[in-house]
Image: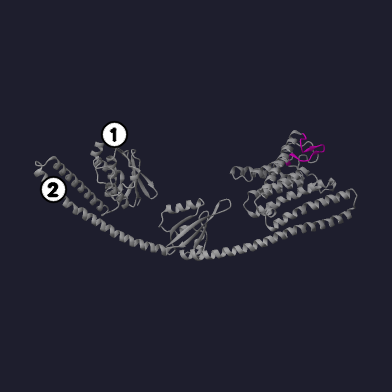
Amino acid sequence: MKSQKLKYISYLFTYLVLFFSVFTMLEWILHKQLVFTINENGATTKFNTALLFFLCTVSLIISRKKQKTYRKPFFLFTYTVLFISTLTLIEYIFRVNLYIDNLFIKDSLTIVNPGRMSEATAVCFIFFAIGLTGLKSTNRVYIATTQHVALVTSIISLITILYFILRFPTDSKIVFFKTMSVQTAISFVFISFLLIFKSYNIGFKETILGNSDGSRSLQRLLPFIILIPFFLSFLMLTLINEKIIGAQSGIIVYTLILILSGFLYTYIVSIGLNKSDYLRKALEKNLINKNSELLQFKEALDKIAIVAITDENTFIKYVNDKFCEISKYSREEIIGSTNEIVRSDYHPDSFFTEAWLTVSSGDPWFGEVKNRAKDGSLYWTETAIVPLKKKTNYIREYMAIQLDITKRKEAEELLASKYVKTLEQKNQELEQFSYITSHDLQEPLRTISSFSDILYDEYHDKLDNNAKQLFLFIKKATRRMSSLIKNLLDYSRLGRQRELSKVNCNLLVNDIIEDLNSTIKQSKATIKFSNLPIISAYPTELRLLFQNLISNAIKFSKKEVSPYISIKAKKKDQAWKFYVKDNGIGIPEQFQDKIFSIFQRLHPEDQYEGTGIGLAHCQKIVGMHGGEIGVKSKLGKGSTFFFTIPNQ
């Protein structure tokens, strides 16, 4: 609230000084008395004075502009003020004419030193220009010094104003202040206030406008220091001039009233300060209690958790002893570095990117992180990273609280490894069972097929149509059973002898298209592909994967529409994602999760041939590569099969 009031006052003073300076310059240019300057005795505020006031005000207005385009005008105006005022003072000191007094407008009204501003005015402008330079400085000592230097301007101006209010005769004034006009003095008070308001909150401004006890005491005493002596002086001089009281008696009365009023005012201020002190002590006691509680919380947290605080740029500012103990780094090695110091190569970059995006948006992040200690040993932590915000919602720090879960993770990994070994053993048994079953089933199936062919050849002349139809069913069933067993055998053999190698997917798909040339021509299919990547994969299995998907796209096409198949690939994080899109009959939504199961068929064999194992092959091949497969489809609008192959 205080700063808002000062802001409004600064706007008012700015407009008043601009109004005064502009109209004063107009009076000189037009040689007419408009508002301030010219009277029957001659000019009281010179054109140079008004011009420098205008330049000072403009400098104050643009002083806080951050754009570089404002920097040059600021210093140009400031140094112009300093240059003209310094030359004017030199004219007074060395009694010379440097021809700057009537440089802009000729003064034909003033008899003595026409066009020249007063000595006091020149000195005030010199001090004020020095104060202006402090607005662009970054040195605290220089800023504080220029603030106090600028106060000289206010003091000189106030003396002139007091002379005017107390009606001092011109002959009784100090020579230095005789020719400074009251309008000029008031303008200096205004722009001195503006200079202090625009300055950084250090030095004089920090003292006079601060919230510390000393600043508040000064703020309460200022009215007495300034106003009471002024009113007493005005009263005593009036009484003495009217000869109501003698000069000696007036001094005695002035002293007594000043002492009494000073005591009363200081007494009242002291009562207020005592109340503030009582309240401060109560708050301090409460703060001590709260700090004691927080200290206990911190001690408890330090005993069980690893704590680190980083700044907004993720540089570590604080770590507790637990952090040093676990990471085996000293505090000196950690402070100033980033979390890279304990980062292991276990997690991908995307893991940390996700964490950073979460906390930088203002939300806490939780996760399990594997870190590396100084000696190279690895340790796991359950981590929570919390952004610490200021009142303006600006994130100034991040606090990471971590629990050491290394033993738990080791137990999980040990347990997982046992399960993995058991699972591998079961898989081997299943693969062996599938192979033996598939292989051994072929022999009796071939026997059935052979004997049925012999019977049919020997007795087909003696068989009626129903018997021939039965033999046809037997032949078709044995052929289908043989195909199922062969596919099951192929399924069990997938991945037995795996060796990764570089595969150019463009060449691979092109070879498949050549192999399926007759089928493609017969169905009038169109297959489009381009810019497919070169990946590390199992060549035979990958070929079977693409061949099954392309064959299915041709097989399950609409009868009245020629098949159109598009094959594309995109880079997704650490993997390639492939898309095989067709314009076929589509798949009902309720069956899209089931089509990858072995022997799963959605259509009767008389409509679409097949064993229902092709997509199961595809799923197993993608799984061998560490990827995932899925489908998006709408009935009657085609399907898009997609799968990922990690970029190894």
Tell me, yes or no, if residue 91 can be seen here.
no
**Observer-nearest residue: 246 or 291?**
291
* Count of picture labels: 2
Question: Tag 2 or tag 1, which sits nearer the N-term?
Answer: 2
Rendered location of residue 311, percent (x, y): 53, 56
Q: Is residue 447 left or right of residue 566?
A: left
Coloring scheme used: one colour
Q: Is residue 512 left or right of residue 293?
A: left
What numbered label is drawn on residue 87?
none
Residue that mark 1 sits on: 560
Vertical relation: 107 (above or below) 452? above
Rendered location of residue 213, percent (x, y): 69, 58
Tell me, yes or no, if residue 628 can be seen here.
yes
Residue at image position (29%, 37%) is: 558
Residue that mark 2 sits on: 450
- Asked which secondary structure carries label 2, the reply is helix
Rendered location of residue 612, percent (x, y): 26, 46
Q: Is residue 393 left or right of residue 258?
A: left
**Observer-nearest residue: 9 or 369?**
369
How would you rate the neighbour count of disc 1 (Cα within 10 Å): few for under 14, some for 14-19, many for 20 or more?
A: few
> Start and end of the magenta stretch?
32-49
- As for residue 402 lying within the magenta part, the answer is no
How would you rate the neighbour count of disc 2 (Cα within 10 Å): few for under 14, some for 14-19, many for 20 or more?
A: few
Q: Residue type at mark 2: give it.
A: Ser
- As for residue 34 lying within the magenta part, the answer is yes
From mark 1 to mark 2, how far is it between C-alphas? 40 Å
Q: Residue type at mark 1: give it.
A: Glu
Rendered location of residue 578, percent (x, y): 34, 45
**Observer-nearest residue: 140 or 508?**
508
Residue at image position (83%, 49%) is: 234
Q: Quadrant of residue 60?
A: top right
